[in-house]
Image: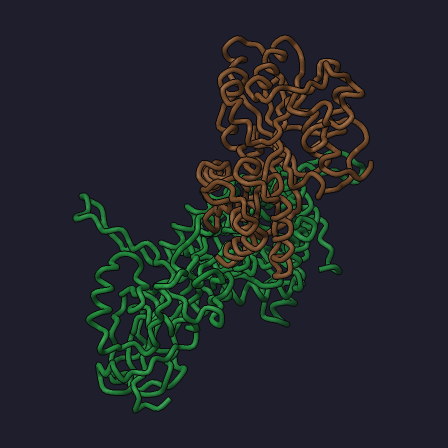
Chain colours: A green, B brown
Amino acid sequence: MATETAVDVVMPQMGVSVSEGTVTKWLKSEGEQVEADEALLEISTDKVDTEVPSPASGTLTQILVQEGETVDVGTKLAQIGGAPGANGQAQTASPEPATAQAAAESADASGAEGETATAELVEEARSAEPEPTAAVPVSDGATDGKSFVSPVVARIASEHGVDPSQVQGSGRGGRVTKKDILNFIEEGAPAAAPAAPAAPAAPAAPAAPAAQPAETPAAPAPPTLAPPPPQPIAAEAGEQFEPMTAMRRGIAEHMRRSLDTSAHVTSAIEVDMSRVVAIRKKLKQEYEKDYGVNPTYLSFVARATVETLRDYPWINGEIRGEQIVTRNYVNLGFAVELADGKGLIVPVLKHAEGLNLLGIARGVTDIAQRARDKKLTPDEVQGGTFTITNPGGYGTFHGTPVISQPQAAILGTYAVVKRPWVIQDDRGEDVIAIRPIMNLTLTYDHRLVDGALAGRFLRDLREKLQTWDESAY
Amino acid sequence: MAEKTYLQAISDGLREEMRRDKRVFVIGEDVGVYGGAFKVTLGFQEEFGAWRVIDAPLSETAIVGGCTGAAIMGMRPVAEMQFADFISCAWDQLVTVAAKQRWRAGTPVPITVRLPSGGGFSGGPFHSQNPESSFAHIPGLKVICPATPEDAKGLLASAIQDPNPCLYFEHKHLYRRIKAEVPDERYETPFGKARVHQEGDDLSVITWGAMVYTAEEAAQQLDADGVSVEILDLRTLVPWDKQAVLESARKTSKVLVLHEDTHTGGFGGEIAATIAEEAFEDLDAPVKRITAPDTPVPFSPHLEKAFIPQVENVVAGLRDLAEY
């Protein structure tokens, strides 16, 4: 893009449900030259932390949003080229990851702020009439029948966490009908409720599939995440305040929502890992030498889990409205603690059913590393069907994680500990041996998964680990 | 099973009840020698005698009053109004005496009043009305509105055996136009259980009596548009199958209530209000009513056509709902 024309850098839409983002770091300063696609700044949203590449080559003329500030999606962050403040002529350009935000530019004028100040908006619209500044024509759609939400559509929307304004209406005047919203949900609607990436005790992969830019080019910004609560006037003696990050707020919302949604029950089982330990010892050298990959215990558990899930489709399933969803694939989420210890993200290994032990070990290493480096794309933290959390690294032997909505269950893996274990010797007599034991927990949504089903799942998973078949995996 | 007209089914059902239950007798204007204005009781007097098939004087008050007394004494009378319109003369006996007797004295009043109702043949204002909702409003009376020959027979048997005063509205327009299979054996069709005339997914029509067929024709046109219409035949208004109506409303979320009776205070209002109260969160459109307007039934064929809901009116209403 030519440098002569001013190009706006706006806060990208990192997934349909994300409504705001925080500028964490400017990688260029005003007056500096920047190339198209070169990393320009870092942002943090409640879904993902990422770099924003420059939409054009030119001089970074003006930075409008400073580090630490949180702004709505579509807000102009900076300008490349042109004269500083040359707003009127600015061409809006979306940075690469932002696919649907261009239309949000016009949202200011079309009332995307919500219902807060209709009168003011009307007033503003009137006074602004002679000199429209938005690059995209303002839609008059807000005045047609689309704004009316019938009782049944409102109910379905709230049950599924869908924003009806994102649905294409086929009723009179563009009204969203019951069929429209049901079709929308069936086709895999992105949840409107902001989905948290993760939480410490209970990692959570966001529910929504990736944004569908082609389908929702003119969608107004989804309802904003609740703003941080106003700070109390003063801290009590000995207390200190720290602003909540977007990720923390996302985690908080998701954890609360999950407990309000699913009937959480946890079952635990003890697994004799002797065989896995022996095989891992043998494979470790080979994998590290040949592939640069460490076959962790987690990889073994993940591989066996995927295999076991084949026989338990409901545990890899979901309750969606009145329907039970099952799948012929497993998108496996892994809780990854972020380096600063403040937060956690759940990257998803897509189609894990097609990966062998090496593939899973490699995939886990890759996404975990990129999660820590903030190089994940929104797509990589979405669409999980089952999650594994591994708090055992610190020696804990039991836990009750929170399910990542809308999944049906989450597996917890704990420390491998040497314990006295009763086994049978060659003569069939009971003896005490020293065995590496790992506890596994399955926390499941009791609405869908019965206790007996969970028990059988854990039993089968234990069986696969205890009798690990090298040739099969 | 044999194919019978709606009228034949009523006649056969009545005869069967009289044969099996000596307490059952028929009384009405011209029901004996003449066989009834519409020939429902043709041949009855020959078979059952003049004491069980009684030609009454031109007094609906006397007919219903006499039936009420006989019922209290243990009989199962079946009164015939020559036209449903004439029942207004018997209002006091029905509403003040028959409907209240059980509450007042604890004695059941098992009477059945047959009411040839409805228009469509230029009968004019006194021979075409559908006064069912007036009686649905009176606690103590049951209101029955069969639409098919099979139901006509089964609901009549239930009415005669019911311990309460039952108003049995038989639609004149269906008498000889509607023919269908009717089981040969005796059976009772239960009250308060709606019949799904046809299943559908997109729109619901709640109706009864002759309008079931109007709805069916309209639904065929909608079907050609790719809109599937469910038609629920209530069969009885008191008691009415609230559950079935709410289920259908929850399924399609768009409901049309259709009746031949006039608009204000028509039973459709009760249905619409109930849906609004109990299925509000399942509605995707306002509940719509198609009824006759608030006027007497006109005599002129053209005006009567404008008065009674026609297939094209129902089609327009359904399309409006579909597009909403």
Q: On screen, A5 above or below B107?
A: below
Taking the spot 53% from the left edge, 33% from the top edge, the residue there is B131
In the foreground, A409 or A219: A219
Horizontally, residue B37 falls left or right of residue B293, namely right
Image coordinates of residue A238 in percent, x first then y, are: 20, 45
The answer to which image quadrant residue A440 occupies is top right
Taking the spot 48% from the left edge, 28% from the top edge, the residue there is B137
Image coordinates of residue A278 in percent, x first then y, are: 67, 55
In the foreground, B22 or B253: B22
Q: Is residue A339 visible?
A: no
Horizontally, residue A65 falls left or right of residue B157, namely left
Q: On screen, A248 above or below B83?
A: below
In the foreground, A104 or A122: A122
Image coordinates of residue A411 in percent, x first then y, are: 56, 48
Image coordinates of residue B300 in percent, x first then y, are: 54, 48
Taking the spot 38% from the left edge, 61% from the top edge, the residue there is A222
In the foreground, A423 or A154: A154
Q: The N terminus of chain B appears in which quarter of the rendering? A: top right
Taking the spot 63% from the left edge, 8% from the top edge, the residue there is B73
Q: Is residue A325 visible?
A: yes
